[in-house]
């Protein structure tokens, strides 16, 4: 095969490749000209036999054959891939076959988010049992035994032995914790200061169930004991939490209050995330929503756990998880959280 | 607690609207829960004279009245009976509007026209009282505007007093707070009154036999009294404060209690046997009837006021019916005493009996207050019921305490509050609150705590006073500190979160159920040991009577509830706690469990949605989830063993093991149970221990070399009797295979004519691979041969060729 013949083959192959209508047809062209048993090996074989000047010309033509035909084949394949396919088209709008829409319960969602937010601030997570001693739940928290929260109308006492409930005081009886504060007591008893923990968990109070009360509910409490911890640290921590949990524009304010285990004690309001404090239905037109109780740990609590109240100060706070979930997601009735209706749960996918 | 602002102003001056005052109080520690405007919107209402009346001809409980409105006589139908002819009453003529928005029009009541309405107090918005129409003095001319007569309107603050501030449970206590807030002076009423005749000590004796429970007891005696209604101004204040007026003597005791916080009790002196008061513990089983008419059995934990013979009052809680003030009462023994908080609380709780008095005593009443309150009450009784007060007082005071002194270090104020408060400001706040600064230096000051501030005990209490008076809005938001906490190990919490997220990733929805459940719900499921149940001694209702010993009962309930709400396809999980009582030791136990429940076409492509769900589908769907969970969370393969469970279908119930660790039970819900909920599809349920599933967090992971040489995949198909399990086949293959066999995968199951009855055909792919060379076909064929031989020999399998 001389150079001219090769050149004409080149033209022919390029034309065939360009005319091929399908990827298979292009592949046939490629095999015919470039394949192992195609024309290219013949041309290369011819090159071996050629001499002198002729050899140079054939070589150039052969190279041109290889590169031009390869380019034509590739170009045609690319063009065919880009073109709209003929025949039946795949309908990608059909439903996906993988059916597994899992969802996290909104109470878990709030706990998970709060735990992550506080963890970034350096808080470790601590948990404890639901069944507690009166010491951990009340006495160590500076709550005297005649405080109304100990009454059988408020607290689930579990009875003494198998005999059931004796008369008050119930010191021998265990109880269902009314708050997660006993976890703070447990942690302070087992860890020297400084300590920075949050304690999510389930709590129990003998409330009659209605739209905002539930006899079991969840709390997240926090405790930070260190050198020179003050109410300003508490405000900074809760303000930071408020912004991350409810939105960047949300602020906090304190109102004086009383809790047996903190002194001073405050109630904590977040500015309304819906109306930005202007007043709306969600915040009952006050611009503020009550979220947490907090304060500086009472020195008498430190005394119970063996912390030196002169050397260390600390703050503690607590808030209801269900309440935050209701406020954050606009859930009107706490009972929806325990009905487990799949149509409700699906909203938290 | 309700306080009329006009009453408050009797003791303190301040310039503020009710809203401004409420704001100041709320941000200094007494939350104002409501501002009630009483008697507003009474503009069109007048005084009407009830000229005469008769029974309504068609209704026994209605009266037909002729009312004179100052100009003419009108016919009015009325349901009340607390009046007689000639009385003057609140009257709403036609066209007038009541505070609740109701407009009065001419209308027929049982067939007779009524031209207006005689009004009760609740209809006028002045109290909750609907006992009868509001009567005014007979001397008021008909047609007078009602507002002129009642002296309304009033603004009443509803306050939430925290448990520690018993001193604020009175008008004067709140006036003291207001005076401190506004920098004005507190004015106390004059308590002087004339004394005459015999000395009290000659008329009454007092003995305290339980001084640990009674800190102080004062008695005064008033004689020659005339019982009757109390003055209108007193009745109005009582009503505005939510207390029902009864008679002058009783009303005075209530009035003074509301005014200063000291509960008082008036005994009919003639009914106090032996003219003798003994404060003692009740004898166990002793009985008495309290003022509310209930006969009560007392215990020796309770404190009583006894006369020479019997208990006449339950100390600090309620008087006895036997010595109460009657219309005929002439002589009164006035008790003003101080009972201990814990004891009063326990008595109140044990008897389920709470009163305005017990509410105050169980929070603590200042013993120093007793004599002042007694004088105040004696003065008012003499003023309103005539008579004379005997000379002096009997005052037994075993619990007198020295004034407390507390030191406040200024550096500590800064340390706790995070703000600098000027020393002058600190001292000003203390003095305004009657915390008298006795000494001070550069470091701090020492204050003398007044007896009424029982809550101020330590330095932190003083610092709280500074915080609330100086203003918490002054406290800045400090940046988050970078110090790390102590090494509290929270790895389990994070492992739980990962487990939860994995379950969600597997396509399950998380549910939460109460920790309580109904006993009958458990009984119906059966299978648990009733003696292990943790039954609540004081449940909120029988639906929440026991602490759940399993998550499965509520899981079934949840699936059923969803079915009845037309959700037929669902996959749920719950991570929750279960509880029990150890039958041997009585000890209470709790642990976390995982429950999974699924029904219907959950997990399946929509396009296959119509195909019936078989028990195999549901079981194997559940098993798939459990296999992934087990491998991912424990690093071990899932293993199942036949088991039995009360709620699961026999033959479809298995124990779940991770290696040799028992995790729990899984299976299909008994048909009868799911049919109760009209669930036609099979229901898969599982309950597992959580702790073994948290091992993933601690599991060590280590790299293994990725195979460098290609694998050879051969298939083997065999026919075996139905009884031969997949697990047995795999075990046989593994036992016969060389190390080069890396995977055995079941890819087809076939039953039918060509296989024969009671037999099944299974096809497996076998993957061979060597770690150090490329295997040849001959080698692979040799491996196959050994495996086929073993299958034939041990399982009597028929190997299908080709």
Image (cartoon, helix red, strand yellow):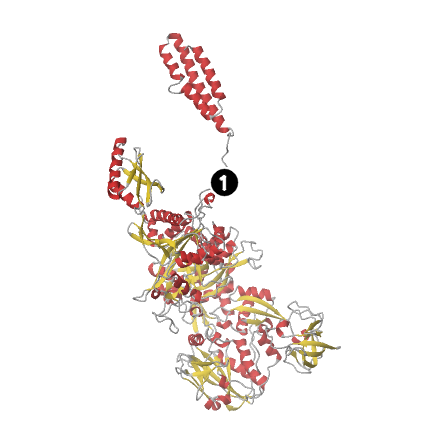
Badge 1 marks a residue whose secondary structure is loop
Q: Pick the residue in front: A296 or A204.
A: A204
Query: Residue at 62% of width from left, 79% of height from top?
Result: B232
Count residues near mark 1 (Cα–Cα under 10 Å), then give few for <14, some for 14-19, many for 20+: few
Q: Pick the residue in front: B567 or B104.
A: B567
Number of numbered tags placed on the structure image: 1
Q: Is residue B445 above or below residue B772?
A: below
Q: Pick the residue in front: B269 or A157.
A: A157
Is any part of residue A298 visible from this angle? no
Quadrant assignment for the C terminus of chain B: top left
Q: Position of residue B338 (x, y in %)?
A: 46, 79
Q: Where is mark 1, residue-wise?
A: A94
Is any part of residue B269 visible from this angle? yes
Q: Position of residue B293 (x, y in %)?
A: 50, 81
Q: Position of residue B266 (x, y in %)?
A: 51, 83
Query: Residue at 48% of width from left, 88% of height from top?
Result: B272
Q: Pick the residue in front: B456 or B171.
A: B171
Q: Position of residue B758 (x, y in %)?
A: 32, 46
The image quarter in which residue A314 lies: bottom left
Residue B558 is left or right of residue B80, and the answer is left
The image quarter in which residue B69 lies: bottom right
Q: Is residue B356 above or below residue A308?
A: below
Q: Chain of mark 1?
A: A
Residue B636 is left or right of residue A177, and the answer is left
């Amino acid at each position: 095969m001389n150079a001219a013949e090769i050149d004409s083959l080149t033209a022919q192959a390029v034309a065939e490749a360009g005319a091929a209508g399908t990827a298979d047809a292009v592949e046939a062209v490629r095999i015919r000209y470039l394949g192992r048993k195609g024309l290219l090996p013949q041309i290369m074989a011819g090159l071996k036999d050629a001499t002198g000047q002729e050899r140079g010309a054939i070589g150039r033509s052969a190279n041109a054959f290889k590169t031009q035909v390869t380019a034509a084949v590739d170009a045609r394949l690319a063009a065919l891939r880009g073109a709209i396919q003929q025949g039946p088209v795949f309908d990608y709008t059909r439903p996906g076959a993988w059916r597994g829409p899992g969802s996290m319960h909104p109470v878990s969602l709030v706990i998970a988010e709060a735990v992550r937010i506080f963890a970034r601030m350096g808080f470790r997570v601590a948990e404890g049992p639901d069944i507690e001693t009166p010491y951990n739940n009340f006495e160590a928290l500076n709550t005297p035994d005649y405080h109304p929260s100990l009454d059988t109308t408020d607290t689930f006492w579990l009875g003494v032995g198998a005999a059931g409930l004796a008369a008050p005081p119930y010191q021998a009886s265990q109880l269902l914790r009314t708050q997660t504060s006993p976890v703070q007591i447990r942690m302070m008893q087992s860890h020297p200061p400084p300590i920075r923990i949050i304690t999510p968990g389930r709590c129990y109070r003998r409330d009659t169930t209605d739209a905002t009360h539930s006899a079991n509910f969840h709390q997240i409490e926090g405790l930070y004991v260190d050198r020179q911890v003050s109410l300003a640290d508490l405000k900074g921590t809760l303000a930071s939490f408020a912004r991350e949990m409810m939105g960047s524009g949300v602020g906090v304010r304190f109102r004086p209050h009383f809790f047996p285990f903190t002194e001073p004690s405050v109630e904590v309001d977040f500015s309304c995330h819906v109306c930005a404090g202007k007043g709306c239905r969600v915040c009952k037109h006050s611009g503020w929503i009550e979220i947490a109780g907090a304060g500086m740990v009472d020195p008498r609590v430190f005394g119970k756990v063996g912390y030196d109240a002169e050397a260390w100060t600390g703050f503690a706070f607590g808030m209801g998880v269900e309440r935050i979930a209701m406020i954050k997601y606009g859930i009107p009735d706490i009972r929806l959280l325990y009905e487990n209706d799949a149509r409700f749960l699906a909203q938290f996918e | 607690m309700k306080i009329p602002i006009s009453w408050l102003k009797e003791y303190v001056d301040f310039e503020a609207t009710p809203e401004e005052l409420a704001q100041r109080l709320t941000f200094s520690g007494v939350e104002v829960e409501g501002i009630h405007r009483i008697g507003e919107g009474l503009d069109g209402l007048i005084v009407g004279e009830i000229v005469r009346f008769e029974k309504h001809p068609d209704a026994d409980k209605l009266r037909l009245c002729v009312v004179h409105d100052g100009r003419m006589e009108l016919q009015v139908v009325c349901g009340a009976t607390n009046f007689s002819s000639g009385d003057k009453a609140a009257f709403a003529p036609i066209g007038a509007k009541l505070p609740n928005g109701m407009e009065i029009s001419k209308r027929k009541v049982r067939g007779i026209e009524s031209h207006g309405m005689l009004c009760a107090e609740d209809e006028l918005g002045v109290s909750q009282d609907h006992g009868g129409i509001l009567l005014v003095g007979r001397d008021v001319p008909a047609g007078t505007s009602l507002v002129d007569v009642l002296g309304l309107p009033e603004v009443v603050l509803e306050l939430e007093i925290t448990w520690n501030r018993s001193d604020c449970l009175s008008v004067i206590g709140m006036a003291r707070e207001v005076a401190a807030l506004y920098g004005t002076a507190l004015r106390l009423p004059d308590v002087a009154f004339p004394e005459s005749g015999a000395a009290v000590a000659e008329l009454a004796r007092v003995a305290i036999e339980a001084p640990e429970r009674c800190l102080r007891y004062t008695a005064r005696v008033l004689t020659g009294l005339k019982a009757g209604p109390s003055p209108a101004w007193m009745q109005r204040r009582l009503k505005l404060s939510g207390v029902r007026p009864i008679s002058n003597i009783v009303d005075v005791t209530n009035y003074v209690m509301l005014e200063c916080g000291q509960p008082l009790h008036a005994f009919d002196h003639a009914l106090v046997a032996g003219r003798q008061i003994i404060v003692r513990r009740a004898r166990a089983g002793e009985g008495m009837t309290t003022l509310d008419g209930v006969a009560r059995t007392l215990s020796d934990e309770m404190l009583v006021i006894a006369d020479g013979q019997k208990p006449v009052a339950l100390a600090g809680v309620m008087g006895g019916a036997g010595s109460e003030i009657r219309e005929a009462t002439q002589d009164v023994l006035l008790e003003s005493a101080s009972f201990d908080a814990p004891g009063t609380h326990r008595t109140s709780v044990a008897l389920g009996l709470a009163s305005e008095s017990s509410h105050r005593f169980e929070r603590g009443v200042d013993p120093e207050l007793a004599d002042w309150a007694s004088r105040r009450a004696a003065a008012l009784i003499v003023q309103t019921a005539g008579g004379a007060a005997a000379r002096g007082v009997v005052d037994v005071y075993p619990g007198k305490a020295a004034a407390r002194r507390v030191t406040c270090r200024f550096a500590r104020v800064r340390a706790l509050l995070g703000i600098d408060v000027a020393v002058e400001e600190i001292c000003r706040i203390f003095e305004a609150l009657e915390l008298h600064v006795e000494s001070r230096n550069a470091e701090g000051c020492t204050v003398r705590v007044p007896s009424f501030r029982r809550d101020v005990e330590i330095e932190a209490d003083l610092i709280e006073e500074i915080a609330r008076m100086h203003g918490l809005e002054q406290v800045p938001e400090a940046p988050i500190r970078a110090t790390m906490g102590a090494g509290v190990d929270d790895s389990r919490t994070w492992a739980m979160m990962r487990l939860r997220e994995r379950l969600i990733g597997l396509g399950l929805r998380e549910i939460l159920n109460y920790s309580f459940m109904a006993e009958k719900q458990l009984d119906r499921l059966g299978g648990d040991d009733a003696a292990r149940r943790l039954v609540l001694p004081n449940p909120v209702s029988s639906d929440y009577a026991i602490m759940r010993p399993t998550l499965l009962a509520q899981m079934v309930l949840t699936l059923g509830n969803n079915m009845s709400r037309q959700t037929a396809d669902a996959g749920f999980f719950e991570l929750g706690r279960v509880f029990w009582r150890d039958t041997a030791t009585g000890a209470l136990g709790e642990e976390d469990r995982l429950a999974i429940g699924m029904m219907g076409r959950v997990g399946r492509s929509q396009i296959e949605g119509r195909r019936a769900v078989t028990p195999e589908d549901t079981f194997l769907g559940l098993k798939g989830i459990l296999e992934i969970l087990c491998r991912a969370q424990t690093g071990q393969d899932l293993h199942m063993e036949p088991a039995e469970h009360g709620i699961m279908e026999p033959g479809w119930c298995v124990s779940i093991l991770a290696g040799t660790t028992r995790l729990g039970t899984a299976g299909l819900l008994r048909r009868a149970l799911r049919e109760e909920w009209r669930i036609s599809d099979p229901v898969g349920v599982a309950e597992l221990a959580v702790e073994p599933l948290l091992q993933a967090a601690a599991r060590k992971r280590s790299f293994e070399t990725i195979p460098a040489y290609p694998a050879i995949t051969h298939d083997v198909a065999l026919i075996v009797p139905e009884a031969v399990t997949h697990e047995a086949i795999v075990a046989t293959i593994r036992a016969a295979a060389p190390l080069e066999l890396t995977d055995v995968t079941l890819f087809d199951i076939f039953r039918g004519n060509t296989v024969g009855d009671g037999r099944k055909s299974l096809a497996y792919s076998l993957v061979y691979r060597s770690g150090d060379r490329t295997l040849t076909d001959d080698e692979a064929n040799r491996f196959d041969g050994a495996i086929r031989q073993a299958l034939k020999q041990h399982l009597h399998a028929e190997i299908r060729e080709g």
